[in-house]
Image: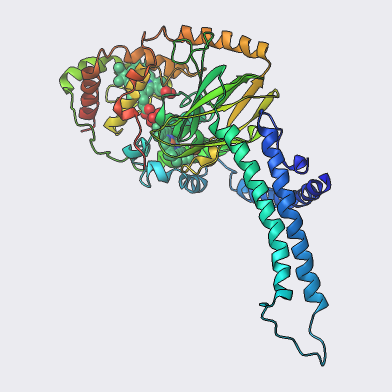
Amino acid sequence: MILDSLLPAAASSYAADIDTLFDVITLLVGIPFLISCYLFFAFILRFKAKEGHKAMYITGTEHKYMKWIHRAHIPILTFDLVIVVMAVQVWYDVKQDLPEMESEVRVIAQQWAWTFVHPGADNVQGTADDITKINELHVSIDKLYHFKLESRDVLHNFSVPVFRLKQDAVPGRVITGWFEPVIAGEFDIQCAEICGIGHGLMPARIHISSASEHAAWVQRESAAALAQTHSPFTGVGTGPANVKPELQLVTR
Amino acid sequence: MTLFGKFIGNTMIRVLPLVAALAIGGFAIQASAEDGEADLERGEELYSLCVKCHKADGGGDSAVLAPAIAGMPSWYVEKQLQNFKSGIRGLHAKDTGGLRMYPMSKWLRTEADQEAVAAYVANMPATQPERELEEHGDAAKGAGYYAVCGACHGASGEGNEGMGAPPLIGQSDWYLKSSIEKYKAAIRGSGKGDPFGAAMIGMVATLPDDNAILDVIAHIQSLEK
Ligand SMILES: [Cu+2]
């Protein structure tokens, strides 16, 4: 498509829809833009000041002049309508409709890191075999995920360019969204909302692997997570109960 | 129609080398200042990155969870900067402070920069951080617990490079408490390849409860006088 060479890979089920919308908008806005630029400069050159030729004063209220404005208006308004209708459709699919999930990840933003909580081998969140990773999100291709996005301090934005997904994280709220990866690979995750001095330094990576590779990863990591709960040093887990008020957030 | 994309793409390709050349030129100028051992001037320049949290006097700021670092020995500061940068320290989901310091350590791109800022920090006069904890322990009881700690941190809390143990005197009380709690919960010291942190996890197990933590802090504070 038109913008392919400018955009990163399209790795989610809805990325192609959004790219199509990009193309439609580029065409519907770009062509009139080029035409108006052409006319603008062509008229400036064509009607530049000439020796002995007096300028004519036009108020532009007569029908024979107005019709050129009306004629341009009609396609522009039609294009706008097309864009609005298509955009609302895509918006509904990506942000408002919530298809049935196959797995759920928790995404927790804070100054300046991402914590991703993956379900363990049981595929259930909130159990002892959950896999907690910092700045690493591991997902399987062709699996529909819900994400639960939280912020521990200020506004952040969970942005996965290859998914064409952006979602603000708002402190105090848990925001649900979804994605379905369609190609394997390792891609960037960014924070897309200025969140303080380290904003530019909170990059993370998404690892999309085949179903079997992902399953193997989950097996290995959830076994490790279970082992860790019984830390040989202390017998103290790393559950939230251990976090004292001093460790919790105070922000400016 | 891909022509349009290609056109913009090509323009970028033409402009990028220029940008890169400018950037490399900038780095070259910076690099020339990195010669020589622990460059204090460079250290001062770099410390401007730390001021936002550790404050101009290096006294720290509890509101952003940044501890006092002024006057800490350079070997310890350097080691911690390396630990943060390599993700040995700070990269734990519950380590709020550590996750803030972790990206900051990436600002120091070279070992020479780590060394320079560590030397500058070590050179700053130590601050006397205010007492911020509301609860206070019993220093006399704390002395009992501290017998263990003294083996590494020194009888008067002055630290011991041979043991890799930092000084504890002159440190903010809230930070001592949060550090001990983090070791207890294996939030700090559990990173891969952190034998010193792992040792501390073992050591704080000798403090049975919250009161013991406050007691040992009270004892450390009594060493400062
Ligand atoms: Cu952020």
In this view, the residue in front, A52 or B185, is A52
Query: Is A89 or A238 nearer to us in this picture?
Result: A89
Q: Confirm whether residue A244 shows in the render.
A: yes
Count all numbered tags in the image, as a single digit: 0
Q: Residue furthest front?
A: A63
x, y percentage for residue B194? 48, 18
Residue B211 in picture, x, y percent from top left = 21, 19
Establish if B199 lies above or below B178. Answer: above
Give the residue at the far bottom of this rendering.
A52
Which quadrant of the view contains residue B161? top left
Residue at 44% across, 43% down: B50
Q: Note whether residue B168 is visible.
A: no
- Residue B152 placed where, x, y %? 35, 19
A230 in relation to B57, above or below: above
Task: Identify the residue at image location x=74%, y=86%.
Answer: A56
Q: Quadrant of residue A244?
A: top left
Drawn side of residue A154 relative to residue B111, left or right: left
Viewer-closest of B111 and A35: A35
Residue B64, x across and y down, in percent: 36, 38
Instruction: Give the colour scheme of this rendering.
Output: rainbow
Q: Quadrant of residue A206?
A: top right
Check the image and report above or below for A163 versus A103: below
Kindly identify the residue that appears in the image at 57 percent across and 8 percent down: A219
Residue, x 79% and y 84% (percent of image)?
Answer: A49
Can you say which quadrant of the picture contains the C terminus of chain B? Answer: top left
Horizontal arrangement in the rendering, residue B39 relative to residue A26 (left or right) = left
